[in-house]
Amino acid sequence: MTASADVGPEEQREQWQREWGELTRLADESLPQALVKMDDLLERMLVARGYPVDTEEERASGGVYVPGDDSTDVLEDFFQARAMIRVLDGKWPPMGKALQKTFEAYEVLYTWLMSGS
């Protein structure tokens, strides 16, 4: 479910809302699978809004600009949640609480992005 370059901002927003709704329903059936797909959606949303989605090494070097003070904590939460997704990709099943924390971090980021921040 990738947005087309021809899609305008309102259509893109509606597409994100539909996709997020599908993913929250999927989370009821398979939270690990939903989280991997949520990570992809949130990355596309961040990129579309002009936020850097970089490697941990680039962030650690301090060479990456993060716009606005309020975005720093939310983006840091995204990168921490993404680290959990990498654990999931490694086939090492994390505990239920870790999955739930990741889901909650992604919900916060989704809400923040949809609010126009």
Image (cartoon, helix red, strand yellow):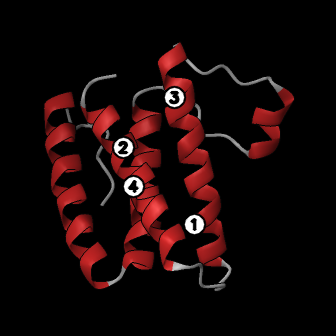
Dot 3 or dot 4, earlier in sequence: 3
Label 3 element class: loop
Gap between marks 2 and 1, in whole Å?
Answer: 16 Å
Residue 24 lies, in percent from the top left, at 24, 65
Q: Quadrant of the C terminus?
A: top left
The answer to whether the residue labelled 3 contacts the one labelled 4, judged by CB atoms less than 8 Å apart, is no
Dot 1 or dot 4, earlier in sequence: 1
Gap between marks 1 and 4, in whole Å?
Answer: 13 Å
Dot 1 or dot 3, earlier in sequence: 3
Amino acid tagged 4: Glu
Q: Nearer the viewer, mark 2 or mark 3?
A: 2
Q: Nearer the viewer, mark 1 or mark 3?
A: 1
Residue to which mark 1 is pinned:
85
Label 2 element class: helix
Residue to which mark 4 is pinned:
104
Amino acid tagged 1: Ile
Residue 55 lies, in percent from the top left, at 72, 45
Residue to which mark 3 is pinned:
51
The answer to which image quadrant residue 11 occupies is top left
Above or below for 58 versus 107: above
Gap between marks 1 and 3, in whole Å?
Answer: 20 Å
Give the side of residue 63 with respect to residue 93, left or right. Answer: right
Give the side of residue 30 with respect to residue 80, left or right. Answer: left
Pick the residue in front: 97 or 62: 97
Residue 112 lies, in percent from the top left, at 33, 33
Above or below for 50 versus 31: above
Amino acid tagged 2: Val
